[in-house]
């Protein structure tokens, strides 16, 4: 069995724990997801924890060698349910497990390790996934590693001009800078970006790359009614972040099989019109291209246009994060639809507290 693509590989449940905090339950995930909640409940922490796990799988994060870290990942690839989990303690792997449709594929503890029922001896500081990649012999290991390689992430709130345009991607699956991303796009893709920018009320008429010598490499923008070209530092933060995201997802749509897009603080700082339009555009894009999206946001405008069925409402007690969602509280979500309230009222009012108190009394 040789792996050709993981286009249908989707993360369906995720949990995570490290020294200072943990997700207490398996977080259910759909094709598109919006993490919401009040300030400081762990939205960014949850996004970053997924980034930590992906970086750990790709051996890109040395900072975890002194951490106590555990993760649980459940995938669905159309035919199979693949469950993978591991525990890392002070730089050593003390537990690792992979099962496919309920059957054990690999198992490891402090003393022993088996892969397809054969005893193996992986290095103490390496996951079996690191040392046993083989597209034919171990296809499910390859599926997970390809999923990690093809994941990517952005922090919308941190998309600031940095001169070389290379500050945005905090997950290294797609680490090209803005200039490189743009240079790879055909003209029809650029035309599509311009059309999307105009739909968001940015009067962009032309986008092109500009190279001067060996060091000056920029993406430049032409705006209706403005004679001079616009480089990154001449754009407002909101405009720059929006244009960067439009270029980024256009680039993703040209890739063979991007698996996961994480976006922290989506649409933060944008006005109502642009926040709602960009949010709709991104969610529709990911559904159309079968790219799993996990976004977090505190933006009230965005919340009102993203269907509640895609929400994970995060709550935190101390260092423990839990989630309320349509999977674990279907009646709560169904009843709210008949209140006539806005989506944002779902978390800003006392509706959840009153509903859960009422349910507890009836029980």
Image (spheres, helix red, strand yellow):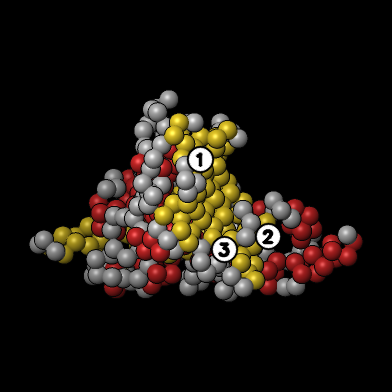
Q: Disc 2 marks which residue?
A: 324
Q: How many marks?
A: 3
The quadrant where residue 347 appears: bottom right
First in residue order: circle 1 vs circle 3: 3
Residue 210 horizontal side relative to residue 194, left or right: left
The quarter in which the C terminus is drawn is bottom right
User: Quick one: which residue is furthest to the front in this view?
Assistant: 111
Q: Position of residue 10 (x, y in %)?
A: 52, 43
Q: Is residue 273 above or below residue 6?
A: below
* Residue located 38% across and 61% down the image: 65
Marks 2 and 1 close (CB-CB < 8 Å): no
For marks 1 and 3, give the one nearer the viewer: 1
Q: Disc 3 marks which residue?
A: 22
Residue 33 horizontal side relative to residue 163, left or right: right
User: Quick one: which residue is furthest to the right in this view?
Assistant: 362
Residue 277 shows in this picture: no
Q: Which mark is residue 107?
A: 1
Q: Is residue 296 above or below residue 72?
A: below
First in residue order: circle 2 vs circle 1: 1
Crowding near the residue tagged with mark 3, few <14, some 14–19, many ≥20 C-alpha atoms within 10 Å: many
The quarter in which the N terminus is drawn is top left
User: Quick one: which residue is furthest to the left in this view?
Assistant: 213
**Which of 232 and 21 lies nearest the eye of the viewer?**
21
Q: CA–CA distance between discs 1 and 3?
A: 23 Å
Q: CA–CA distance between discs 3 and 2?
A: 16 Å
Q: Position of residue 252 (x, y in %)?
A: 38, 48
Residue 29 horizontal side relative to residue 137, left or right: right
Q: Position of residue 26 (x, y in %)?
A: 62, 53
Q: CA–CA distance between discs 2 and 1?
A: 32 Å
**Which of 248 and 145 lies nearest the eye of the viewer?**
145
For marks 2 and 1, give the one nearer the viewer: 1
* Residue located 72% across and 73% down the image: 349
């Amino acid at each position: 069995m040789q792996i050709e693509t993981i286009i249908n590989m989707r993360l369906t449940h995720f949990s995570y724990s490290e020294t200072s905090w943990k997700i207490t339950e398996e977080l259910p995930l759909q094709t598109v997801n919006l993490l919401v909640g009040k300030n400081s409940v762990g939205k960014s922490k949850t996004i970053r924890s997924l980034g930590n796990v992906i970086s750990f799988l790709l051996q890109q994060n040395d900072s975890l060698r002194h951490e106590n870290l555990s993760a649980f990942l459940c995938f669905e690839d159309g035919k199979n349910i693949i469950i993978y989990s591991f525990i890392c303690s002070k730089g050593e792997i003390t537990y690792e497990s992979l099962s496919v449709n309920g059957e054990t594929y690999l198992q490891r503890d402090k003393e022993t390790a088996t892969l397809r029922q054969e005893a193996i001896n992986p290095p103490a500081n390496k996951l079996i996934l690191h040392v046993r990649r083989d597209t034919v012999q171990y296809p499910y290991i390859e599926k997970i590693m390809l999923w990690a390689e093809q994941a990517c992430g952005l922090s919308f709130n941190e998309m600031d001009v940095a001169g070389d345009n290379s500050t945005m991607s905090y997950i290294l699956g797609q680490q090209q800078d803005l200039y490189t991303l743009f240079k790879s796009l055909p003209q029809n893709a650029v035309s599509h970006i311009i059309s999307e920018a105009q739909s968001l009320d940015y009067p962009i008429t032309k986008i092109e790359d500009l190279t001067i010598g060996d060091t000056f490499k920029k993406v430049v923008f032409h705006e209706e009614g403005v004679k001079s070209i616009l480089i990154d530092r001449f754009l407002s933060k909101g405009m720059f972040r929006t244009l960067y995201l439009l270029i980024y997802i256009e680039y993703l749509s040209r890739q063979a099989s991007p698996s996961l897009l994480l976006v922290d603080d989506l649409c933060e700082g944008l006005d109502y019109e642009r926040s709602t339009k960009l949010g709709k555009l991104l969610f529709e894009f990911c559904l159309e291209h079968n790219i799993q999206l996990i976004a977090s946001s505190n933006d009230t405008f965005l919340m009102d246009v993203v269907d509640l069925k895609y929400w994970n409402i995060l709550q935190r007690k101390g260092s423990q994060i839990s989630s309320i969602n349509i999977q674990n509280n279907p009646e709560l979500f169904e009843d709210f639809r008949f209140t006539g309230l806005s989506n944002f009222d779902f978390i800003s009012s006392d509706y959840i507290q009153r509903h859960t108190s009422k349910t507890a009394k009836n029980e």
